[in-house]
Image (cartoon, grey):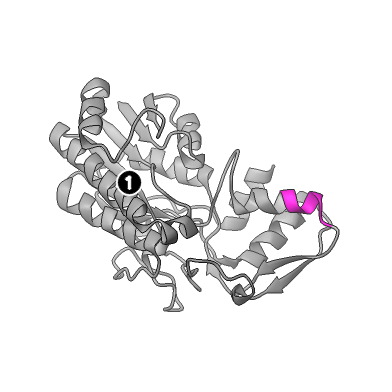
Amino acid sequence: MKILITGGKGMLGRTLQQTLSSYNVATADIDDFDITNRQQVLLSFENINPDVVIHCAAMTAVDRCEIEKDLAFRINAGGSENIAQACAKNGTRLIAISTDYVFSGNDGRPYREDDTPVPQTVYGQSKLAGEDAIRSTCPDHLIARIAWLYGPGGPSFLHTMLKLAKNASAPLRVVNDQRGNPTSTLAVADHIALLLQTSLKGTVHLTCEGAATWFDFAREIFRLSGLPVQINPCATSEYPRPAPRPADSQLENSALKENGLPPMPHWQEALKSFLQ
């Protein structure tokens, strides 16, 4: 099986390369593969001829998306459509990475795969437009939504916290009114490897089980790292940003359970394994 990973230099792309090293893996990133250029995408497919594409490439800087809306849609929606069209033309299976930001975060419960997305940010709107383009263009697709990602090499919230801890001269303040699923790229990559052995289509959530606030997450990072860092909870309103953050964007991994697939690890177990 030949696999093409777009966004191969990103945190998840790098982890996937390691996890899937037993396959024939090709990677592409912005330096040599512009997903917004349809002709370049089609030509690359002819040269690489992949059996599966794992589409990680995206504009993920949430606040930058809010400011540069046209660019966000060109990459996250238009780029995904180009990849989907190339997959459909070549009979290639497409596994595309999406996000919890397609949901509003205002419902106070974990979101299932079949819940109606109501994105509140340009990032979420552009990723949802990409999902819709994939669904309407490529029959053999699987959209995998992830959230609160950390992994080898970063950048991530975890890496930021560890860096701040080394230079902390005063208690750190961490937001305690946003809830989500801290998720390791290692766990995501392991489950994508499992999904490659199935013919599952549609949408699946791949977040670690259990939920936390950013404050909870930071406290567990420091506890498991043995760092005596004092942290205090604070509100999102104390750190205004261009893009609003979902208050509760927990995802429920319903599709894994309904299809008899192994569950994702609990976020605390995955974090412990990662830090070890």
Residue 27 in magenta stretch: no
Residue at 64% across / 61% down in the picture? 217
Q: State left or right for residue 173 relative to residue 238.
A: right
Magenta span: chief secondary structure? helix
- Count of numbered circles on the image: 1
Left or right for 265, reference 161: left
Structural crowding at the residue carrying mark 1, measured as other residues with C-alpha within 10 Å and reported as few (<14), some (14–19) or many (≥20): many
| Location of residue 164 in the rendering, given as x and y in whole percent from the top left corner | 74, 53
Question: Three-letter amino acid code at disc 1?
Answer: Ala
- Spot occupied by residue 116 in the image (x, y as percentages of width and height): 29, 70
Label 1, secondary structure: give it. Answer: strand
Of 48 and 253, which appears nearest the observer?
48
Q: Position of residue 238 (x, y in %)?
A: 64, 74
Residue 253 visible? The answer is: no
Residue marked by disc 1? 96
**Could you tell me which residue is drawn at 45 percent across and 37 percent down?**
13
Task: Give the magenta part as a residue range.
Answer: 163-168
Magenta stretch contains residue 165? yes
Left or right, 219 with respect to 202, comes to right
In the displayed structure, 226 sits above or below 194; it is: below
- Taking depth in this image into account, of 225 and 57 the one nearest to the observer is 57
Q: Nearer the viewer, residue 120 or 191?
A: 120
Can residue 230 be seen here? The reply is yes
Query: Quarter holding the N terminus?
Result: top left
- The vertical placement of 38 against 67, above or below, is above
Q: Quadrant of residue 127?
A: bottom left
Farthest residue, direction bottom: 107
